[in-house]
Image (tube, grey):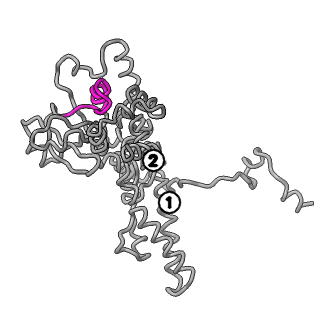
Amino acid sequence: LKVSSSCASHSPHEAAMGKKSYVNYGKSFRKPKRPFEKERLDSEMKIIGEYGLKNKREVWRVNFALAKIRTAARTLLTLDEKSEQRMFQGDALLRRMIRLGLLLESEKKLDYVLGLTTAKIMERRLQTKVFKLGLAKSIHHARTLIRQRHIRVGKQICDIPSFLVRLDSEKHIDFALTSPFGGGRPGRVRRKKAASGGGGGGGAMMGAPRAWAPGDMVIIRGLKAKPELNGKKAMVVPPTAEERETLKGTGRLIVRLIDSGEQFAVKPDNLKTTAEEADDIMGSNLEDVSMYNPAIQSEAAKLRESGKLDDLANDPELKPIFEDIKKNGMGALEKYWNDDKLMAKISKVMGTR
């Protein structure tokens, strides 16, 4: 009887009274043993402010994960170096730490795992990376951009600020294609202003100089010294202290090319938003769509030379695509540019006619 009663499932009320519960969940953080320790409180507040965290639970969660990693490394270090468990599990742990960017390739030893700190993990968070890459004005702005689904890692939108970015994914962090910052549809307020006749540019519509901010996606236009850069997509980035002193009084901005990552200074008059560029291009000829993407320019030039652009535009299969690009702008263009079958058809037409 005692055995059967102990094996029986307990009600939530019994679990609350201290009896065994079978709820399937695990701890993700652990509260400190001493809640009012001054040194720990000060260090936690410093980390929260530096990395723009929501609350102390985020710090405790990182500390809990770090403790489990260090415990695993410490357990493996007690085994013999030729032990199969240490060899396989130790290599797997080190590979994971290197893949996440927590250890360098030259630090393939379990001793280095014991030296990991909270700050190292915080530096690998998506929120920190977005700010360090210049996509956000501040660490808190970075968190807002991520939560509002403006940031993607590769092709996947990520709205988790605590997402740990792998080394090979770091170079793929950018604005989402559906975000207004990445050339997508304008936001609700800008659409409302445009519908009411106020325009989306604010003071820029009245002739006042436009105020560019770090993270703004722009198209370079009107450069005479480097005409090969005209039409390329770039992003405004915050200048360093040294660059700020150099550019003082010139009014120039620092921009970074999206395709190559090259940075240089340009005048604000040589920049246009992707929305403004879309308005200009879609109001002109179909062949000028190539300005959206420099990689398309060579294809457009071949079409102009062959005189077959009109044939392509009137093709029953391609005609709705051109209409969609005219209507929806850059988002539609990017969608079709990544369509391998469509590009293959255009190439085939160019080669056979």
Let me know if residue 167 is in the magenta part. no
Image point 34% across, 34% down: which residue?
A: 309
Residue type (three-letter) at the residue carrying disc 1: Ala
Residue 20: quadrant of the picture: bottom right
State whether the magenta stretch is mostly helix, strand or loop. helix
Image point 57% across, 80% down: which residue?
A: 85
Count neighbours of disc 2 (C-alpha within 10 A) and say few if under 14, some if 14 to 19, many if 20 or more: few
Expressed as whole percent of the image width and height from the top left, the position of residue 120 reads: 37, 60
Image point 49% across, 70% down: which residue?
A: 93
Expressed as whole percent of the image width and height from the top left, the position of residue 22 reads: 74, 54
Residue carrying label 2? 340
The magenta-colored residue range is 271-288
Residue type (three-letter) at the residue carrying disc 2: Asp
Return the residue found at the far front. 353
The answer to whether 339 appears left or right of 238 in the picture is right
Query: Residue 65: which disc?
Result: 1
